[in-house]
Amino acid sequence: MTDKAAGEETFISHLVELRDRLVKATIGVAIVCVALMIWPGPAHIYDIIAEPMIASLPVGSKMIATGVISPFLVPMKVTLVLSLILALPWVFYQVWAFVAPGLYQHEKRLVLPLVVSSSFLFMGGVAFCYFFVFGRVFKFISDFSPTSIAVTPDIENYLDFVMSMCLAFGATFEVPVVVVILVRMGIVSVAKLKEIRPYAIVGAFVIAAIVTPPDVVSQLALAIPMWLLFELGLLVAPAFVRATQAPQEPV
């Protein structure tokens, strides 16, 4: 067999392996989605997601649906997104299983902890947003709203807001992983990151001002954790570098 034929065969085998991993990841998400549809059900899931908003409205108030199929479609979207979040460890495991055969042993010691930590950090960011941020943001907005305005949020607009906020906080909680990867790949050193700490703090507040609503509560709730997680990344990065040193690399 020629080198060209061997290379083509290897490439095809990688594509087949990638397809299999994508199928397994999709099946995992689908299983979680079916389980959530059976219990507690899309309608109840949306009620839980909407609870922080409902709690900030006057007693007896409800959200509205302006679309004909919105009462059906929106809860289904929420269920699908929640299924993907809950299945993240399985999805990231499939990513890990795909890339692991091409890694050295010392590289595997880095990738697996990052895969696990990325999953739980993202879910932690979403949980922090739901349990800590939403209630305070919605109460702030409700208290600021004039009494002449009846606040009746549309369920689709509310879903868009919730998804964008959860994505922002989930991505923010990945800051330690980003710091570790940058340090381990040699792109930047811990010493250099400590030097630019003031710029990182300012950047955290700028990012928070861009991706959150124009209120102080949500901006601080995003910027401060981003800064603290940056500091956490500076603390754990040296340990990761030492643990994943190749035998020939200088410590």
Image (tube, rainbow, N blue to C red):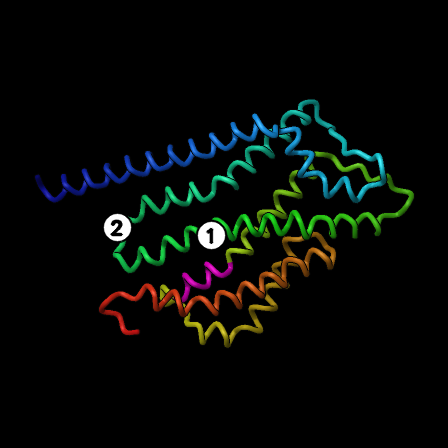
Q: Residue at x 40, y 70 (%)?
A: 238
Q: Residue at x 45, y 76 (%)?
A: 191
Q: Secondary structure at mark 1?
A: helix
Q: Residue at x 32, y 34 (%)?
A: 20
**Is 179 in the magenta?**
yes
Residue 131 drawn at (x, y percent) = 66, 49
Residue 111 drawn at (x, y percent) = 36, 54
Q: At label 1, which amino acid type do we have?
A: Ser
Q: Residue at x 73, y 59 (%)?
A: 216
Q: Main secondary structure of the magenta part?
A: helix
Label 1 to label 2, Cα distance in Å? 21 Å
115 shown above or below 156:
below
Q: Earlier in the sequence, mark 1 or mark 2?
A: 2
- Contact check, label 1 and label 2, Cβ < 8 Å: no
Instruction: Residue 102: give its label.
Output: 2
Magenta stretch: give its range: 175-183
Q: Secondary structure at mark 2?
A: helix
Q: Nearer the viewer, mark 1 or mark 2?
A: 1
**Residue on which the image places disc 1:** 118
Q: Residue furthest top?
A: 68
Residue 128 drawn at (x, y percent) = 62, 52
204 left or right, relative to 175: right
